[in-house]
Image (cartoon, helix red, strand yellow):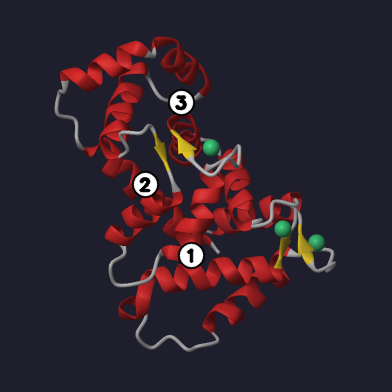
Amino acid sequence: HFDIMCYFISATFLLCLLYSADTVEDEMEMATVRHRPEALELLEAQSKFTKKELQILYRGFKNECPSGVVNEETFKEIYSQFFPQGDSTTYAHFLFNAFDTDHNGSVSFEDFVMGLSILLRGTVQEKLNWAFNLYDINKDGYITKEEMLDIMKAIYDMMGKCTYPVLKEDAPRQHVETFFQKMDKNKDGVVTIDEFIESCQKVSIQC
Ligand SMILES: [Ca+2]
Ligand SMILES: [Ca+2]
Ligand SMILES: [Ca+2]
């Protein structure tokens, strides 16, 4: 499970780098930032980024998405640039839903910053909560074996055949069976947030 977590965090980190890469001064963008000082101040209080970092992130965000929001298609395009050898469509879809916390079909700058804040600077507990929310595809508070299998297949698709040329067809299912056995402590067929956090923390300690 740990390597999967690392993969998904690094993938998200790449997205962050892309957004913040272009730090070229642009007067128009700075003007836009100045138009929303209250919004940035609120975000500074809610997230773990400084005002300066938020301005850089905002400029990159507006650069990439002038409309101020990211839709699912844009998200998928960005991911496919980083994983050209595989098909990242499904994983990008799941990640998009995890970032779109108010489920209105778009990732606003606020959604983006709050997600990044957790992934890059959150506590272990916050990161695990976020990961649980990602795996809980239908957001009902439980991770089923099917949901975990869907995520696992999406990650395998994203990494592509070049990364794991000798991978057997049933590898994702075998992985899920192993993880699920370990996580589903009371054997009721679903993983709750408590079971998830308990087993992930054990893995982290072992690493
Ligand atoms: Ca949203
Ligand atoms: Ca669920
Ligand atoms: Ca259980």
Which label number is shown at residue 13?
2
Inspect the image, locate mark 2, and give the three-letter code of the amino acid beneath it. Phe
Please give the residue where the numbered disc 3 appears in the rendered image.
Answer: 48
- Mark 3 vs mark 2, CA separation in Å: 15 Å
Q: Residue at x 58, y 53 (%)?
A: 134
How many marks do you count on the picture? 3
Q: Which residue is the site of mark 1?
A: 90
Q: Amino acid type of disc 1?
A: Thr
Q: Residue 207: give x, y in percent of width and height.
A: 50, 58
In-front residue for pair 43/122: 43
Name the front one of labels 1 and 3. Answer: 1
Q: Are marks 2 and 1 in contact (CB under 8 Å)?
A: no
Establish whether ligand 1 lies closer than 8 Å to the Cβ of label 3: no
Mark 2 / mark 1, whichever is N-terminal: 2
Q: Return the disc, 1 or 3, that comes first in the chain's sequence.
A: 3
In the picture as drawn, the residue positioned furthest to the front comes out as: 67
| Direction from residue 173 to residue 21 in the image, left or right | left
Crowd band around label 1 with a 10 angstrom C-alpha radius: few (<14), some (14–19), many (20+):
some
> In the image, is residue 178 above or below residue 194?
below
Give the camera-side residue of 21 and 177.
Answer: 21
Q: Is residue 44 left or right of residue 181?
A: left
Left or right, 5 with reference to 125: left
User: Are there few (<14), some (14-19), or many (20+) residues within 10 Å of tag 2?
Assistant: some
Give the amino acid at mark 3.
Lys
The residues tagged by marks 1 and 3 sit, at their Cα atoms, a distance apart of: 29 Å
Q: Earlier in the sequence, mark 3 or mark 2?
A: 2
Badge 3 marks a residue whose secondary structure is loop
